[in-house]
Amino acid sequence: MDWTPVFAEALDIFIRYLQIDTSNPPGNEKPAARFLGQLIEAEGIACEYIETAPNREVVIATLKGDGTKRPLMLCNHTDVVPVEPQYWTVPAFEGVVNDGKVYGRGAVDMKGCGVMQLITFLLAKRMGWNLKRDLVFCAVPDEEAGSEWGMEWLCKHRPDLVDVEFELSEGGGGTNRFGREETKLFSVATNEKEVAWMRLTSIGTPGHGSRPHYDNSAVHLVTALAKLASWERPLTFTPDTTAYLERLGEAGLFPPLSDRGAVEDRIRKSPELHAMFINTLNITMGHWGIKANVIPAKSEATIDCRLLPGQTKEDWLRQVREQIDNERITVELLLEDQGEMVGVDWDTELFRTIESVVKGAMEDAVVVPTMTVGGTDNRFLRARGIPAYGFIPCLLSPAERAGFHGNDEFMTVENLNMGCELMYEIVERMCC
């Protein structure tokens, strides 16, 4: 295949897609669904648009196979996290290309991967693949706010559409650096942590800010938050993270598991690694006070907690309350229980295909199963017994990886091109 015009098409689609503001909240993903759908329909492929809430749509399309094998779904989300524009050096919704980098909110999370999947889907039609299985393209809203109006809604109300054998979405991918070493490390996410957002509330006695005061709700809350911030917890090893470290050790990128001291030392030195071995908590929002000279009666803070597989929200809630040890502080969960996080097997046709394609393209590449430290739409499909893997097939630099929910988010044109090629090869081998 002559990839030059394909790369140009992918870049054009990517730029235009980034120009659609789908910040969530509020979402408003319908224009993005229609944008992707029109590109698919232009190839003569029928699309279904499913409204899950006002101005929020799923777009889904299928290329039919001969039924020899069960379907493969390529899934991506159309929403992005909000932007603080004053901290960006480029406009967040213009798809600016500069020095081989494409800037825009959603570039790596996850409109870039969505374009890789879309290009593969369009090429499958153009190339006339003889499909052994249905190939499904699915773009959903609301992933960044818990998926209530996206994949969760789809699984509850249209389970027929997610009746597939395998699924590919976000949650893992490649990086060109591990620690201080340059490498080609590709992680395929087979499990993830559970989102357990919490609200802490303190009620005190209001009063005048000019006098000493001993029942300030903000002081009670800040004291509690300080206890949580200084809370040191032991490392927990799960089957997914153990397999991850074993493969890293075999590749010479990590100490052997037998050297537990060295292993734990390396883990604690890397925030990204450390998050895979503990329940994390971070203070993300705070609110108190109505005026400079009024002591607040009520103070609130939100903490973002992510729980390891096998942990329960009820037990974590108990641990947080015990750590705070203050009856003046109320701790409550913000999200409804979405069920236990379920890991899936990595000894599958899809995992082996990913590994074969990656190593065929880069002989020195290392492919490992991993656990996503954030939340993705994959969890809803894994709960249905579907091997749903997180995998963005390109080598993101540390700067690109920092773009996940960060400022000046970007993806290089080189990575976009690599992702299109690798995604195409993986899907072709799985479906033909």
Image: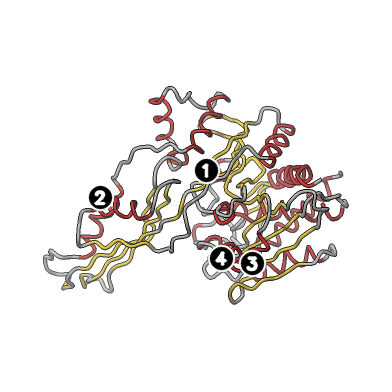
Question: Which residue is at 25% across, 55% downward?
Answer: 224
Q: Which residue is mark 1?
A: 371
Render colour scheme: secondary structure
Q: Amino acid at mark 3?
A: Arg
Q: Which mark is residue 323?
A: 2
53 to 283, vertically: above or below: below
Q: Amino acid at mark 1?
A: Met
Question: Which residue is at 43% across, 51% downward?
Answer: 306
Q: Amino acid at mark 4?
A: Ser
Q: Of helix, strand and loop, which one carries label 1?
A: strand
The earlier-in-sequence mark between 1 and 2 is 2
Q: Of helix, strand and loop, which one carries label 4?
A: loop
Q: Residue 51 at x, y = what percent?
A: 64, 73
Residue at mark 1 to residue at mark 4: CA–CA distance = 26 Å
Question: Which residue is at 55% across, 54% downward?
Answer: 383
Q: Residue 241 at x, y = what percent?
A: 49, 37
